[in-house]
Amino acid sequence: MWKDAIKRFLPQLIMRTLPDLYGDVDFSQEPEFLSQELRDTIQRPIADSHNPPLFVDELIKLFMKNGSIEWVLFHIEIQGSGGEDISFRMHLYYCLIFSHHRRMPVGLAILTRPRPKGEKTGIFAAEQYGTRISYKYNCFEVYNLDDEELLNSDNPFDLMFYAVKKTANVREESKFAQLLTLTRLLALKGWNEEDRRDIFNFIVRAVNLKDVALRQKFTRVIEGDGDTMTLSFVEEYFLNKGTITGRREEKFETARRLRAMGLSDSDISKATDLPIEEIEEFAKL
């Protein structure tokens, strides 16, 4: 979902996170997304769970307005609470990018959750027998952003940042309340319908409301609000009775029959492609 959002709202992301860079980029020239190119070039002979392939989240070629620099490479990593040492990985990715492109990237780590205690962010430094390495990169801490500022902002990414910030490790009822608030707020924003639809798609995936009954309640409430522009893109995710919902109802009916036959939820999930959590919730209805 992050890659989709970055590609869709790249100027707004740069404006929010690195305003100095935003002022120098020529957005009339289409940015080039290079992460797949790097993925295809840097392959390991043997990939395993202990040594996964070294792929950046996003690498973008940005063209500049004027000056001696024609273009810069913009490296973005999205990091939550897990994963290895983010500073070590940022330096490792810097080495890979520099080795391949022979150009220093502008590095940005978007931290959606606090890092483990004692882990330094924003800089990688190492020293051994008089040899020293130091790599400083940009950090953007989503979890420290002000809620009111995010909700009142005209930058689409701020609303998406808010969704990520407020719905981590919370109960389904809280997710439902936040999703309803954000959807109604989105309807009031002055963005065009296509932008609002794409922002909504991100928010739904970020909130990740798993409770089937609450999903159904959400659609009923939105239908009752009567905002046709909002409803049009909510339908694509929750209603769409001729396609998405219809197929899902068929899958749940299949799941019900398989459960009655004594199959485990794990086997039912494999047979229907439904998440185990949804099968369990549906069984309670």
Image (tube, grey):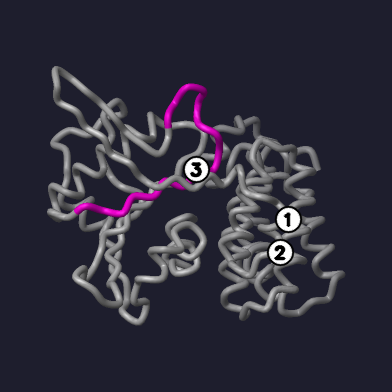
Magenta stretch, overall SS: loop
Q: Image check: 27 left or right of 224?
A: left
* Residue marked by disc 1: 148
Q: Which of 20 and 12 is in front in this view?
A: 20
Q: Image check: 55 left or right of 251?
A: left
* Residue marked by disc 3: 111
Q: What residue type is labelled 3?
A: Leu
| In the image, farthest residue toward the right | 224
In this rendering, the label closer to the viewer, 3 or 1 = 1
Q: What residue type is labelled 2?
A: Asn
Task: Indicate the position of residue 7 as horizontal and vertical percent values.
Answer: 42, 66
**Kind of element beneath mark 3:** strand
Q: How far apart are marks 3 and 1 (CA)?
A: 19 Å
Q: Residue 152 carries which label?
A: 2
- Tell me which label, 3 or 1, sits earlier in the chain: 3
Q: What stretch is highlighted in magenta?
A: 104-120
Q: How far apart are marks 2 and 1 (CA)?
A: 6 Å
The residue located at (14%, 21%) in the rendering is 130
